[in-house]
Amino acid sequence: MSYQALYRVWRPQRFSEVVGQQLVVTTLKNAIITNQISHAYLFAGPRGTGKTSAAKIFAKAVNCHHKQDGEPCNQCATCTAITNGQLADVIEIDAASNNGVEQIRDIRDKVKYAPTEADYKVYIIDEVHMLSTGAFNALLKTLEEPPANVIFILATTEPHKIPLTIISRVQRFDFHRISAQDAFNRMKEILDSKQLEYEEKALWVIANAAEGGMRDALSILDQVLSFSKNRVELADALLVTGSVTKQLLKEYFLQVAGGESAAALATMGKVLAQGKDGQRFIEDLIAFIRDVLLYQESPALVTVAATGLSEDDFAQLAQAASAHRLYSMIDTLNEVQEEMRFTTHPDVYLEVLTVRLSQLKASAADPVVAKLQEEVAQLQQQVTQLQQRPAVVQPAPAPAGPNPAPRRTAAKPAGNHGSFRLNLKAVYQVLDHATRADLTKLQDLWGDALSLLDNAQTSLLSLSKPVAASPDGVVISYGSGFLLEKAAGGNLTESLAKALEQVSGSARTVAVVPTERWPKIRQDFLTARGYPKKESSAPSPTPQSAAPAQPKPAADPLVAAAEQLFGADGVTVEDN
């Protein structure tokens, strides 16, 4: 055979020719330059990313006597023999077909012998993850205590299948997928050197279809060259790869984004009529929507030239659907793609997919926005209700007259605050056993109790505070009438009682009072319990004291009792 495939002819022979693996190449070159060569390496990564090629280049570099900056000369007898696969000291083994214990034991026996021609004996084991458990165990001792001048290079596409005992004894290098830009540049370099005509858009189609593998890209390029008689054209590249044209994808996307299911089905009919692969169509559509999504985020994230569209096209596409709807489209495409793997009628799935994408609405595609809209509507309703509540108007002064008739006003029931009813019995039960120590303890635990509630309940309690506490109860004051009604009408007090029990370790009843009425409630309680009676037993002032000095608040028995219950900080003495 005189003809060789492009990926064989253009296989890298120097580290500088390895595409898209700059970190790996730099590390290996520096190891050779500084003579810090390990006894075992693991090259892991997807297919066609240069693992075996880098292993052979490394084998040449460590044995070349004329290397420069870690690169083999590719001119000496050793380099030439390794390139042609004729050097006995560089052994390539395919673990897919040599995965038994006997083959590895043979390696273990022969590894003891010194190299015959080269400085290092190099074993390159490809697809090493296919070795059996016994074979790995046979290899383990050799990797742990290798003979001098022996290097093992293990290559695999599935490193997770390799035992950790093996991985811990090697230096691991991860080869990454080759970007479409790097694959495009490499193919362009090859075609320019061969002086062949090509369309750049066709090279972009091949680079994207290769999915990160340089060998795959060159194989597809080889097919296109054979199909189009040594000329790379866009139509031929699309035909060979089974891809759909970008203009057809754009047309289809705009139709489903606009809800035009009939037109989108007609476009899908064109795709099926051209014999396009259904899986490839979904993959192309996912990549297309991904480009639109990135363009919405930042136009600089998308290489427009690589997509085959213009800036104007992307500007139009970015306005066709929101980001959340694009997320929903991608989820739907992934779901249908998974289902299509086991069917012999992909056209049915593609037609159903078209209808589903056309019927996606912004509300269904964006649950976050829908929830926010619902919350905004609820807040607007609450604001409207507050605005409709009657304002408190002071009665106007009676008109001047001989004997104006007194206006009777309906007495507001004690303890009524809007629709809130004050439970004085529950408040008094707490105050009967209230102490300053219990209140201080509860104030210290107040923040911890609020942290156990949800956000809505914490917001309702933001304007409240404990004003009295007993071992089995607490009195909470509210400064907002609207919030007071919300707190008393719902299950907030029950939730607060459970939270206080959790942080304090004891069950407590919760009583709620309006902040502006709390001083009066407190004074009435002290009066009802007979604390002012002690004041009547105090001796009357002497007649000589014409202008007696005002007694200190602390000497008042009522004040003293209040300070004992609520603390000095919670009591204010006013002269009325």
Image (spheres, rainbow, N blue to C red):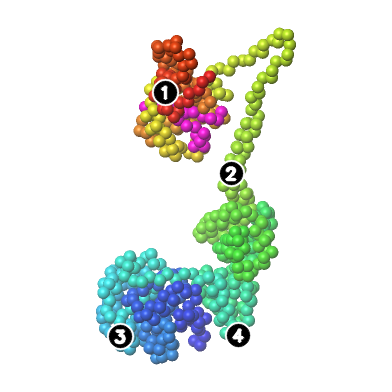
Q: CA distance from mark 2 to mark 3?
A: 72 Å
* Residue 554: numbered disc: 1
- Horizontal side of 138 relative to 400 (left or right) equals left
Q: Earlier in the sequence, mark 2 or mark 3?
A: 3
- SS at mark 1? helix
Residue 153 x/y as whole percent = 36, 76
Q: Residue at x 54, y 78 (%)?
A: 186
Q: CA distance from mark 4 to mark 2?
A: 60 Å
* Residue 178: numbered disc: none
Label 4 crowd bin: few (<14), some (14–19), many (20+), radius 10 Å: few
Is 430 in front, or is 366? 430
Label 3 crowd bin: few (<14), some (14–19), many (20+), radius 10 Å: some
Residue 7 x/y as whole percent = 50, 79
| Residue at numbered disc 2 | 372
Is 19 in front, or is 70? 70
Q: Earlier in the sequence, mark 1 or mark 2?
A: 2
Q: In this rendering, which labeled residue sits more in front, label 2 or label 3?
A: 2
| Residue at numbered disc 4 | 195
Give the residues in magenta: 458-481
Q: CA distance from mark 4 to mark 1?
A: 106 Å
Whether residue 347 is visible here, answered yes or no, is no
Q: Residue at x 43, y 90 (%)?
A: 75
Q: In this rendering, which labeled residue sits more in front, label 4 or label 2?
A: 2
- SS at mark 4? loop
- Horizontal side of 290 relative to 555 (left or right) equals right
Label 1 crowd bin: few (<14), some (14–19), many (20+), radius 10 Å: some
| Residue at numbered disc 3 | 115
Label 2 crowd bin: few (<14), some (14–19), many (20+), radius 10 Å: few
Q: In this rendering, which labeled residue sits more in front, label 4 or label 1?
A: 1
Q: CA distance from mark 3 to mark 1?
A: 103 Å
